Amino acid sequence: MRKTITHTMVCFFTAAALCLSACGSAGTGTDESSVSEERSISEYSSATENSSAAEGRSVLEELEQQDVSAVQNEIDDLHAQAAEEAAAAEAAEEAAYLADIGLEGDSDADLYNLSEDEIRKLNFQEIFSGCIVMGDSITEGIYVYEYLNSSQVIYKNGISIPSTDDHLAQAQALNPCVVFLSYGSNDISHIHYDYEKFREEFDDFLNRAQAALPDAELYVNLIFPAKAPLTEQQPWYTETAQYNAVIIEVCGEHGIPYIDSTGLVSDEYYSTDGYHFYGSFYPLWLYNMAKEAHLL
């Protein structure tokens, strides 16, 4: 607007100058009439210039006020619209996720504080997408009871820590983002009370696991306690807390977090051998793993 006003004034002055020039060339005399005309034109030009400038400033100020207000209102509207769209997209995404994991329509669910009924509704195959749980026959139950699929569980009945190279190779081929390690329970049956030997074996195991899976987040599950009749037949299984203390220490040295799910077990979940678990236990265990690894 300022440029427009200036250009108008320049055009006006140019026209006035041309007019004066024309008047001057029309006669060579300096009679009173010519002088009067020139004085009138000059006065008119000055008055017009002042009037135009004042009017231009007034219009410019008015337009500037209107433009700023309009632009600010438009910006505010765009921000509000963007916020509404983001909130709607987030709500839709959350609803889709809840549906995927088995909590459709339960938008108020606190995923880290679910009831047991809600836990049993969860789709763990979706939650553990890109993850692997590795271990022995206790881990096998996760697959047997169909909570995870064959690409999410690596297991072997009776496996001990020194025999895990094949499991690590299988896991490496799957390129998981998160791996849960559940070993050590079978080692109790041959190590008995030799905690130092157990420590050496577990330390070596974690060295191999970190070398084989350098890009995966590793978590170590503590050993579940056993009960009769196993503890009566093999009394060293009453000392699982001692073995878990070793696991916790070694995990700390390797910078690997451990997961303690031992408090979840109760008599109702144990099978008749006092060692393995019924299918009803596995959702609780998987849910605790998912929480500890922030999979929810």
Image (cartoon, rainbow, N blue to C red):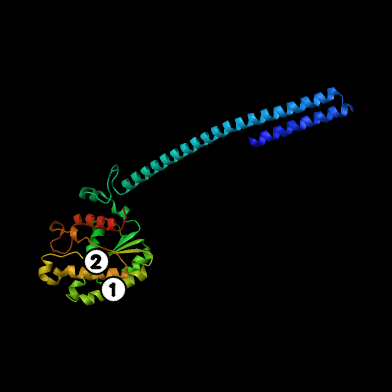
Residue 230 or 294: which is nearer the viewer?
Answer: 294
Residue found 57% across the figure and 34% down from its top? 64
Q: Is residue 175 left or right of residue 43?
A: left
Quadrant in the picture for residue 106: top left
Q: Secondary structure at mark 2?
A: loop
**Residue 65, relative to residue 206: is it above or below?**
above
Asked if residue 185 shows in the view, the reply is no
Q: Which residue is mark 2?
A: 136
Residue 21 rendering spot, x and y as whole percentages? 83, 31
The residue carrying pointer 1 sits among few (fewer than 14), some (14 to 19) or many (20 or more) residues within 10 Å by Cα, namely: many
User: Alpha-carbon distance for marks 2 and 1?
Assistant: 18 Å
Residue 259 or 279: which is nearer the viewer?
Answer: 259
Residue 55 rendering spot, x and y as whole percentages? 63, 29
Residue found 19% across the figure and 54% down from its top? 280
Which quarter of the image is occupied by the N terminus?
A: top right
Q: Earlier in the sequence, mark 2 or mark 1?
A: 2
Residue 166 rendering spot, x and y as whole percentages? 32, 70
**Residue 245, relative to residue 15: is it above or below?**
below
Q: Secondary structure at mark 1?
A: helix
Quadrant in the picture for residue 287: bottom left
Q: Is residue 222 left or right of residue 74?
A: left
- Which label number is shown at residue 203? 1
Looking at this view, name the residue that lies furthest to the front: 32
Quadrant in the picture for residue 266: bottom left
The amino acid type of the residue labelled 1 equals Asp
Q: Nearest to the eye among marks 2 and 1: give it.
A: 1
